[in-house]
Structures are given as structure tokens and as C-alpha cells.
Image (cartoon, grey):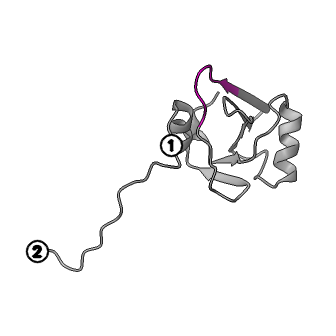
Amino acid sequence: MRDITSFASVFIHREPVDMRKGINGLSEIIDLENMGSIKGNNLFVFCGKRRNSLKILYFDKSGFALWQKNLDAARFSWPKKITEEIVSLTSEQMSFLLEGYDVWKMKPFAELQFEKLC
């Protein structure tokens, strides 16, 4: 698989999908739900109902590639409180997700605004 940072966008399909689906079935979901340009420089991420398996679909110059990661004893964190069907992530957030972090609870420091300095 290419380096995650080489992709322009990462799109997550929030609802669980049948993990028996392959390239054709997942491509159909991307097309029907307008997730983004299927032949663009994008990653499309799908998760099963049990959240122990991810499938990542992308297009490279010669065709589609499908990558799958299964967890034995853990579950992937997944957006529960977000109402949109399609969720965008940065490549950095996607890397964290694959490493087991809950990217929806990770919040950076708030930006400070100063009127004047001492």
C-alpha cells in the first residue's frame, strides 16, 4: 500500500458494511453515496459491524487496490455521534486510527488570542 500521506483525502463510510464485499461492491457504495472521486487520489475506508475489520479502497494508476486490516482482540474507534454518512479525515488522523487511537476524542490545544503582550 502507498504511504497514507500521499493521498489527497480520506473518506470514511460511517455506517457498517458487509465485509464480504470486494472492490466492485465497495466501489458501488462510493458511487451511490457520492463519497468522492473514485479515481481520484483518495482513500475510502469501510468498517464492519463488529468494528474489528477495516477495508481501504483506492485507485492507483493501473487499477483499484483493496487493503484490509483485521484485529484479533481490539476494535477500531468509529464515529458514533457524527450524523454525516461520509466523514473526512486527515492522513495523520487515518494513521492514528490504524494504530488504535480514537481520533474523535483527540483534540488539539485551543488557539490563544492576545489583545496585547505584556
Q: Which residue is mark 1?
A: 92
72 to the left or right of 27: left
Q: Amino acid at mark 2?
A: Cys
Separation (CA) of disc 2 from disc 1 = 36 Å
Q: Main secondary structure of the magenta part?
A: loop
Residue occupying image coordinates x 62% and y 19%: 72
Q: Is residue 62 visible?
A: no
As drawn, the residue found furthest toward the left would be 118
Q: Amino acid at mark 1?
A: Glu
Q: Position of residue 36 (x, y in %)?
A: 75, 53
Give the residues drawn in magenta, as a range.
Answer: 68-76
Q: Is residue 80 visible?
A: yes
Q: Residues within 10 Å of mark 1 (few under 14, many from 20)?
A: few
Q: Position of residue 113 (x, y in %)?
A: 29, 73
Residue occupying image coordinates x 83% and y 34%: 18
Q: Mark 1: which secondary structure?
A: helix
Q: Which residue is mark 2?
A: 118
Q: Is residue 67 above or below residue 93?
A: above
Q: Quadrant of the N terminus?
A: top right
Q: Quadrant of residue 94?
A: top right
Q: Is residue 66 magenta?
A: no
Q: Quadrant of the C terminus?
A: bottom left
Residue occupying image coordinates x 75% and y 35%: 61
Q: Is residue 74 magenta?
A: yes
88 to the left or right of 101: right
